[in-house]
Amino acid sequence: MLTNLHQLLGGRPPEDPEDPVFVEKVRREVPPEPRSQRSEWVLAAGWVLIAVKCVAVWWVIRAYAVPVHPGWVIFPTLGAAAVCTWLYWRR
């Protein structure tokens, strides 16, 4: 509406109604980022360290009779690592 008023006051001829005024769709092609071997090695090393930690936590809790189930430490660790790995592979 304001565009038409501006055209009327400015004395410009109206635009061709067949000419599309609005952009219907914008597409941006983003090439996929190549996988980084260094990142994959760091991810694999992290999983190895997590496995070592899980075994160590299980052994320490059993050996010293800590009144807590090892799953309270191990399951959140595995869950967070799984989310990080999933996010890396999904990108």
Image (tube, helix red, strand yellow):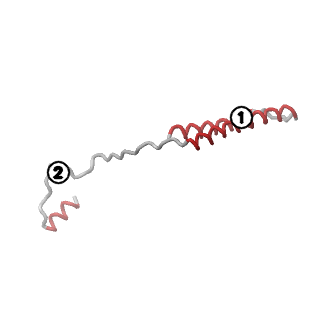
Tag 2 and tag 1, C-beta contact below 8 Å: no
Q: Amino acid at mark 2?
A: Asp
In the rendering, which numbered label is found on residue 32? none
Please tell me which residue lies in front, 37 or 63.
37
Above or below for 8 versus 41: below
In the image, taking residue 38 as reference, residue 15 lies left or right, namely left
Front residue of this view, candidates 53 and 83: 53
Where residue 54 sits in the image (x, y, percent)?
A: 74, 35
In the image, is 63 to the left or to the right of 43?
Answer: right
| Quadrant for the N terminus in the image | bottom left
Give the residue drawn at x 69%, y 38%: 77
Closer to us: 54 or 31: 31
Q: Is residue 72 visible in the rendered structure shown here?
A: no
In space, the residues marked 2 and 1 are separated at their CA atoms by: 63 Å
- Image quadrant where residue 65 sits: top right
Which image quadrant is residue 14 in? bottom left
Q: Can you give x and y, in whole percent of width and height, for residue 30 in the image?
A: 40, 45
Q: Please state the horizontal and vertical placement of residue 33, each as a whole percent of the image.
A: 47, 44
Residue 87, quarter of the rendered image: top right
Query: Residue 89 at what x, y percent from top left?
Result: 53, 37
Please give left or right for residue 58 compared with residue 82 in the image.
right
Name the residue beneath numbered marker 1.
51
Q: Using the image, determine if residue 55 lies above or below residue 28.
A: above
Q: Residue at x 19, y 65 (%)?
A: 6
Q: Amino acid at mark 1?
A: Ala
Mark 2 or 1, which is nearer the eye? 1
Q: Secondary structure at mark 2?
A: loop
Compared to residue 29, the image places residue 15 above or below, namely below
Q: Residue visible at 79% across and 35% down?
A: 56
Note whether residue 91 is visible.
Answer: yes
Q: Is residue 33 left or right of residue 29?
A: right
Name the residue that disc number 2 marks: 19
